Image (spheres, rainbow, N blue to C red):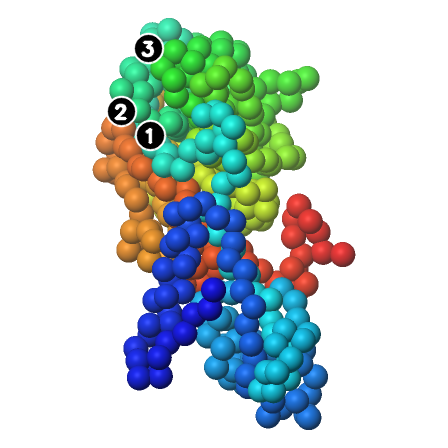
Amino acid sequence: MDVFVHPDYRGLRLGRRLYAARKELCRSDNLKAILAGGRIPGYAQYADEMPVMDYIEKVKRRELHDPILSFQLANDFDVKRIMRHYLPEDDNSRGYATLLEWDNFFYEEDIQSIHDVEKTLVRIGIVQWQMRAVLSVEDLLDQAEFFVDSLSKYQADFALFPEFFNAPLMGLKREQNSVEAIRFLASFSEQIKTHFSKLAVTYNINIIAGSMPVLEDGQLYNVAYLLHRDGSIDEQYKIHITPHEKRDWVIDGGNHVQVFETDAGRVGILICYDSEFPELGRMLAEQGVQIIFVPFWTDTKNGYQRVRLCAQARAIENECYVAIGGSVGNLPRVDNVDIQYAQSAVFSPSDVFFPHDATITEASPNTEMIIFADVDLDKLKQLNTEGSVTNLRHRRMDLYGGFTHPKK
C-alpha cells in the first residue's frame, strides 16, 4: 500500500493526518509495528558528492531536506537499513530506498490467560497518618486497619503509609534514651509486618507499610515492607541515613535498591532522604520502574519541601509517577519524633499527557486524611516515544554511562 496526496491538496497536512490514522489503526488492532519502504528522491543531486549513508545522516540532522525521508522522520519513523535496487528505474533515488519502522509501544503479546493481562489503570491510595498516643500495639494496628479498609472500599491497588508511622509505640515505655527507644520500637516490627501482610490479603490491596526499624545481627536498619495482596512480601532498606538517624538512633544504611513486580505495575521504594539522591531514582528507571513510593517523615516545612521537590524531579527525569506519604500531628512524650509536617501527594511527569502542574492529587497540609490518584501506565509509554522531551531516550550513555549498565 502506498500513500499519496494530490498536488492540488498539498500543504494542508493531509499526509500527516494519513500517517496518524495508520498509527491509530496499528494501535487499535494491536499490531507490533509499521514497516515502510521509502524512496529518497532528493539524493540524485548529491549522489556525486557523498555516499548514500552520508546523505541519510545529513537528512536526519536536518542539514539537508528530502521530500519523503524528512517527512517520515518527522512522523517518528526510524531508518533500519538501506535497500539497494528497490526501484531500479527510480533515477532520483539512484535506486536506493530506506526501510523504516514505527514501533507500537502499546503492543501486547498474545494473551493466553486473563492473568496475563497487564493492568494499565492503577489507583494509588495514601494515608496521611496522624501521630497520636496509643495504648498498645493492637491500638495502633486497629487504626491502620481502619485506613486499609477505607482505601480498599474505593478499590485502591496500593496503600502507602508514612516512614516510622509506628513511632507512637515508643511512648509505651517511659524513661528511655534515644537508642533504647528505637530498639524498643524495633521489637514490634515483625508483628506489624505479619499483621499488615494479612490485611493486604484480606482487603485485596498492596500495602507499602511505611518504614520500621529492624534489628539484624546487632545492627539497626530502616526498612520498608511491600506486602502484596497475594501474600508475598518484599523489602527495601533505606540507603542513605540522615545525620539525625545516625547520631541519635545509630541506624545503618542498606546497599541495594530494586524494582518490584506487582499485579499493578513495576514499583520502587525510596524512603524519605533517599528521594533526594537522583542516582537511586535513575537506578530504578533503568530497571523499568513505573511508580516510585516515598514514605517520609519530616518535622518542618523546609524538610518537607526537600522531599517534595526532589520527588517531583524524580518523576520528570525518570518518566514515572511518584507518590509521597507523610505523617502529621505531634508526640510530645516521644523523643526525636515530637512534631511532624506533611502534605502527601502524587506527582507525574510534566508533559501534555499529564496535569499542567505535574501534580495529580495532594492532601491538605497537616491534616489526617486519605487521598487517591488514578494513574495511567500507558501514558508513560506514550511519553517515552512521543513526549515534548524524552529524558530517558536522550541520556548520554557515552558520556556518563548507566548504573545497571555502567559505562565501559
Describe residue 257's horizontal placement relative to residue 112 as left or right.
right
Q: What amino acid does circle 3 point to?
A: Asp
Query: In the figure, is residue 184 to the left or right of 21?
Result: right
Which residue is tagged 2? 154
Which residue does the numbered mark 1 point to in the structure image?
125
Quarter occupied by the C terminus:
bottom right
Residue ranking furthest to the front: 89
Residue carrying label 3: 142
Answer with left or right where residue 36 lies relative to residue 397.
Answer: left
Q: Tell me how far mark 3 sits from mark 1, CA to CA.
A: 18 Å
Q: How many marks overall?
A: 3
Q: Nearer the viewer, residue 32 or 172?
A: 32
Residue at point 38% right, 17% down? 204
Percent across and percent down for residue 243 are 54, 38
The quadrant holding residue 389 is bottom left
| Element under disc 1 | strand
Q: Position of residue 162 (x, y in %)?
A: 40, 29
Q: Is residue 288 above or below residue 131?
A: below
Q: Are marks 3 and 1 in contact (CB under 8 Å)?
A: no
Specify whether 23 is left or right of 100: left
Give me the C-alpha separation between circle 2 and circle 3: 19 Å
Residue drawn at 28 percent across, 41 percent down: 361
